[in-house]
Image (cartoon, grey):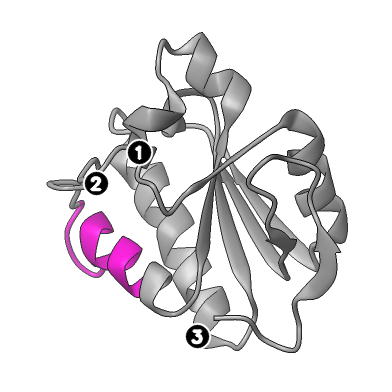
């Protein structure tokens, strides 16, 4: 979902994507479902408030870019399971970006990731953060 709030600057990466109003940078993966849940909850809420949003998966969080990787992540009420949050996030136009260097460092390839997610560079991460109206770093 492109909104009038999207900045018309594209990132330098091969799968360039527009910058967004809200960026959540997530460093933990399945080993820390609390942090994953909070990051996705905040990103969904940014979309509900009419902002565009991107979640950047870095360090161990890149594992969440694999298809069905969020399945079973559920910390319980009052939070929704991460799979449901991810579905809402994508349905509402949210974007997932994955750090290319982090993928390589963790022994993964872009082909291992869900095809709808963008693989981005460190420079792209900086562009996303610098152009966002707000950000959340969950580390």
For the magenta stretch, what is the residue range? 75-88
Identified at 73% across, 63% down, the residue is 18
* Secondary element at tag 1: helix
Element marked by disc 2: loop
Q: Which residue is mark 3?
A: 48
Is there a contact, CB below 8 Å, between mark 1 and mark 2? yes
Which one is nearer the viewer's eye here, 45 or 56? Answer: 56
Tag 3, which secondary structure? helix
Residue 17 percent across, percent down from the top left:
68, 57
Q: Position of residue 71 (x, y in %)?
A: 16, 48
Residue 81 painted magenta: yes
Q: Residues within 10 Å of mark 2 (few under 14, many from 20)?
A: many
Task: Report whether 120 appears left or right of 34.
Answer: right
Question: Eyeballing the image, is 128 above or below 50?
Answer: above
Residue annotated with mark 1? 64
Residue 49, image x, y percentages: 58, 87
Whole-Å distance between the Cαs marked 2 and 3? 21 Å
Q: Is residue 93 above or below residue 129?
A: below
In this rendering, the label closer to the viewer, 1 or 3: 1
Quarter assignment of residue 138: top right
Q: Quadrant of residue 1?
A: bottom right
Left or right, 72 with reference to 96: left
- Pointer 2: what residue? 70
Instruction: Give the distance between the C-alpha atoms of the residues marked 1 and 3, in whole angstroms.
Output: 22 Å
Mark 2 vs mark 3: which is more N-terminal? Answer: 3
């Amino acid at each position: 979902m492109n909104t009038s709030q999207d900045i018309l600057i594209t990132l330098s990466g091969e799968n360039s994507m527009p910058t967004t109003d809200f960026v959540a940078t997530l460093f933990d993966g399945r080993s820390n479902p609390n942090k994953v849940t909070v990051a996705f909850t905040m990103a969904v809420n940014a979309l509900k408030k009419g902002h565009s949003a991107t979640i950047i998966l870095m360090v161990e969080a890149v594992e969440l870019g694999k298809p069905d990787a969020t399945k079973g992540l559920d910390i319980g009420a009052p939070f929704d399971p991460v799979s449901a949050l991810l579905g809402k996030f994508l349905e509402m136009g949210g974007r997932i970006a994955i750090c290319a260097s982090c993928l390589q460092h963790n022994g993964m390839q872009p082909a291992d990731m869900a095809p709808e997610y963008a693989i981005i560079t460190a420079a792209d991460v900086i562009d996303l953060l610098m152009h966002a109206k707000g950000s959340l770093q969950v580390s």
